[in-house]
Image (cartoon, rainbow, N blue to C red):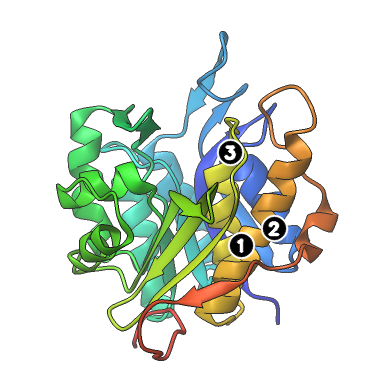
Amino acid sequence: MSRTVLSLQSYVVQGTVGNSIAIPMMSAMGIRAWGLPTALLSNHNGRSSVAGVPISADQINGIVDAVDSNGELKHVDAVLSGYLTPLTGPAVLRTVEKCRNHRPDTMWVCDPVMADMDNGQVRVYVPADTVAFIKEAVEDADVLVPNMAELGILTDTMPRTIDEIVAAARSLTGPRLVVVTSVPYRDEGHDELAMVAITKERVMMTHGPFIDRHFNGAGDLTTAVLTEQLVVGESLGSALGKTAGVVHAVLERTSKHPGDELDWSPEDVSAQPWKTEILAPSAPSRVGRSS
């Protein structure tokens, strides 16, 4: 039977952020992807005009309870979450708990959407109460997918080197796997971009060409592909390399066109994986929860 991912993220009518990119991409990769919107918007908030409605915690809970009553929640292999707020975040945590009540090994993949790097400086774009909620909530996640700015916020550090990134990630006591995205990397005189995967036993990295342009939804795409790879049981190295390969294929095509929305195609799922490098002694790499 196909693996199932329940993704709780915003949905936009026009654009490629949140569930509007995560659901079609995971579906194209061959798994069942169920999208539960945490907000319904016209487009992402960076546009000059935006309209829509938030989905309340009560509404999220009601939808999840209905799915559960129909006997379907027991099929969920992983929960994927994006932007969490103090208002809707508890409903997301409740959803994870209800899924784990059926299957203790249900994996929670959390993208702690809070901030990014702007010319070497951390730019936080969520309120302080949201930061506080996320810092506490992520300790219950299995897989955490922050960028460097978010990793720094979560650990009260300012990681700049690979060693500092690894130390910061390992200071988090909850997640079994931390995958740090958008890591600047210099290789043979060329500016590149890396992803670093850290567990308690090992560190793996993949790096490749840096495309100097902003892409809306790139982080949501990355987390979706990584979730699919982990939920079907790929090794950490294979999952990391495939994620980088698929995301780069999408970004490379997008860079050839105007606009800031991802130009993706189902054929991107066949992109060649990037090479991964083991930076620590080898150890079992399957990610999930022990029952």
**SS class, disc 2:** helix
* Residues tagged 2 and 1 counted as in contact (Cβ below 8 A): yes
Q: Which mark is residue 158?
A: none
Q: Which residue is mark 1?
A: 243
Residue 58 in percent (x, y) is at 37, 41
- Residue beneath the point at 25% across and 27% down: 127
Tell me the distance, in whole angstroms, between the alpha carbons under discs 2 and 1. Answer: 5 Å
Residue 64 coordinates in the image, percent (x, y): 47, 55
Distance from the alpha carbon under mark 1 to that under mark 3: 14 Å
Placement of 39 over or under 193, stated as above or below = above
Using the image, tell me which numbered label, if any, was put on residue 217. 3
Instruction: From the image, tell me which residue sits under label 2.
Output: 246
Q: Earlier in the sequence, mark 2 or mark 3?
A: 3
* Residue 268 appears in view: yes
Left or right relative to 262: residue 148: left
Q: Is residue 210 above or below residue 101?
A: above
Residue type indicated by callout 2: Val
What is the secondary structure assignment of the residue under circle 1?
A: helix
Amino acid type indicated by mark 3: Gly
Of callouts 1 and 3, the N-terminal one: 3
